[in-house]
Amino acid sequence: MTAQDTFTQEIEELAQVRDRIGPEFERAVALITEKSGKVVVTGIGKSGIIAHKIAATLASTGTPAVFLNAGEALHGDLGMVAREDVVLMLSKSADTAELAQLLPSVKEIGAGCIGIFGCTATKLAQACDVVLNVSVSDEACPLSLAPTTSATVSLVMGDALAIALMEQQGFTSEHFARFHPGGQLGRRLLVQVQDVLPAGEPKAWITEQASLRDAVLELSESARGAVCILDNHKTIRGIITEGDIRRHFLLGSNPDQPVVEIMTPDPKVIPSTARLGQALDLMESGDRQVYVLPVTDDKGHYLGMLRMHDVVT
């Protein structure tokens, strides 16, 4: 079997599972929404690995969730399940011994129970509140033994639940940032432009009366990659970048030429309270990308120069 064959088979099985999704999916979403607790996702073996990932996806997208190893649950870990929780079980056979032993206790606790099963005709399946049918005709494994296609469709069904719950809860990028404070993602969604500007007096600016020579000196001193040209009210009139200066010197410009004659007027600017992600989007938008952005306060006054390096560090 070639790599393409594996992809083709799994895609075809996914399409079949997609086409038979019915009202039971909406009931599963409603059950999770109605309960005020968490989703406890459980399984054993390969299904347990998929269950672990589904729990992580739910938790990171606004639905409180934890993974529970079905074997460990039978020896005390079931204590994490409460009445207002929903237990989400994963099993290809829908006859996994550990899950079957687990279900009576789940029912006694009063938690809801949803099965993501590859079979719907077992006692375990019939005892669940809702069953999502993820049965497949065959595995991608040439021996039809290793959980391959069945694992894929279970994972995608878990993703579908997570996305449906996100939409129902009105989950936004701000919520997402709250759950992902680390790394570049959290930095771009949470940190404001003003948080990364250099401390002290604003740098990288010159007056309208300055010359090209003055711009070069300020560029060298501030090391921000560009300088802003300000009027007497600290309002931005234009900008000159290092690249602009190189081009003008190659064209033979006079160092004493007034800077207002060669600046780029009305440049892109970013308010100091904007998020770093918004700044990055602005830098990359339009016909020409920029690597520096002038920063302004709520009155439009210049506060400093933001570099691409400040955003992606």
Image (tube, grey):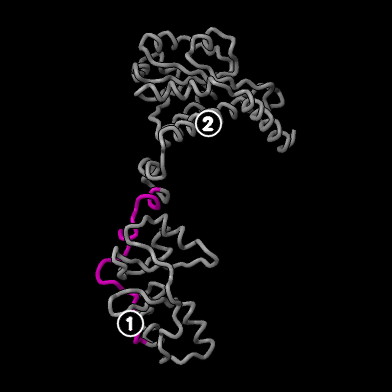
The one nearer the camera, 125 or 260, is 260
Dot 1: within a 10 Å radius of its alpha carbon, few (fewer than 14), some, or many (20 or more) residues? some
Residue type for callout 2: Ala
**Can you give x and y, in whole percent of width and height, for residue 151 in the image?**
58, 27
Residue under pointer 1:
207
**Can you give x and y, in whole percent of width and height, for residue 220 in the image?**
37, 79
Measured along the vertical axis of the image, is residue 220 above or below residue 295?
Answer: below
**Can you give x and y, in whole percent of width and height, for residue 283 in the image?**
46, 63
- Farthest residue, direction right: 1
Q: Secondary structure at mark 1?
A: strand
Dot 2: within a 10 Å radius of its alpha carbon, few (fewer than 14), some, or many (20 or more) residues? some
- Please give left or right for residue 17 compared with residue 308 in the image: right
Q: Secondary structure at mark 2?
A: helix
Q: Residue at x 44, y 59 (%)?
A: 280
- Magenta residues (range): 186-210
Q: Quadrant of residue 157?
A: top right
Residue 202 lies in the magenta stretch? yes
Query: Which mark sits nearer the N-terminus, 1 or 2?
Result: 2
Residue type for callout 1: Thr
Separation of residues labelled 1 and 2 (CA atoms): 56 Å
The one nearer the camera, 169 or 11, is 169
Measured along the vertical axis of the image, is residue 241 above or below residue 256?
Answer: above
The one nearer the camera, 288 or 187, is 288
Residue 197 lies in the magenta stretch? yes
Q: CB of mark 1 within 8 Å of CB of mark 2?
A: no
* Quarter of the image where the N terminus is located: top right
Q: Residue at x 24, y 69 (%)?
A: 200
Measured along the vertical axis of the image, is residue 288 above or below residue 143?
Answer: below
Residue under pointer 2:
160
